[in-house]
Image (spheres, rainbow, N blue to C red):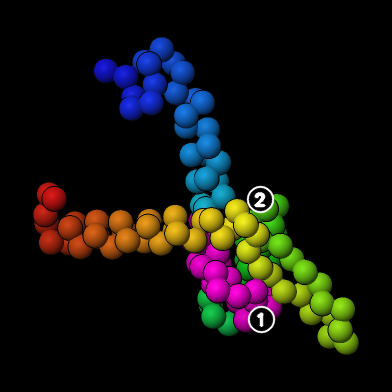
Amino acid sequence: MACIKCSGKGDCNGFFLPLNDLMGVLSGKWKMRLILCMANEPKHFNEIWKCQGISPRILSKELKELELNSIIVRTEIDDNLKSVIYSLTEPGRELVPVIMQLQKWGTVHRENILSGGQR
């Protein structure tokens, strides 16, 4: 039997490539948390750092990866403090309901597993 979107003749890559891209963008412990952290408003580096409990080095790395994938934009504020704010791009905002749906699924799945159910 073939995959849900494939003929069974080795043509699955076209279907799964975008899913692999999505998983690459969202992979790791912090990416989805950071996206949700910026869901309602842009944030300064220190605001994100304090709210997430992530080391500054890892936060910087994760933000750079999200920026590279066009999920967030980094904007330098030209004031005396040379501050930076991070905000979601349109593709980043589109991920918020996707992440929320994944969280909802995870909650139900966790409850099912912990209760020993086979739902």
Q: Quadrant of residue 113?
A: bottom left
Residue 99 in the image, given as x and y percentages of width and height: 44, 58
- State whether residue 52 is above or below residue 93: below
- State whether residue 116 is above or below residue 15: below
Q: Amino acid at mark 1?
A: Asn
Residue at figure coordinates x 44%, y 55% from the top left:
98
How busy is the neighbourhood of tag 1: few (under 14 within 10 Å), some, or many (20 plus)?
Answer: some
Q: Report how far apart the C-alphas of labels 1 and 2 lie in the structure.
A: 22 Å
Report the span colored magenta: 28-49
On the image, numbered disc 1 is attached to which residue? 46
Residue 49 in the image, given as x and y percentages of width and height: 61, 77
Please tell me whether mark 1 sits on a helix, a strand or a loop. Answer: helix
Residue at figure coordinates x 12%, y 49% from the top left:
118
How busy is the neighbourhood of tag 2: few (under 14 within 10 Å), some, or many (20 plus)?
Answer: some
Locate the N terminus and report the quarter of the image it occupies.
top left
On the image, numbered disc 2 is attached to which residue? 69
Query: Are dots 1 and 2 in contact, CB under 8 Å?
Result: no
Residue at figure coordinates x 20%, y 62% from the top left:
111
Residue at figure coordinates x 74%, y 66% from the top left:
74
Drawn side of residue 10 relative to residue 34, left or right: left
Q: Amino acid at mark 2?
A: Asn
Using the rendered image of the protein, determine whether residue 54 is visible from the camera's viewpoint. Answer: no
Residue 114 or residue 70, whichever sits in front: 70
Reply yes or no: does residue 7 show up in magenta.
no
Residue 29 in the image, given as x and y percentages of width and height: 49, 61
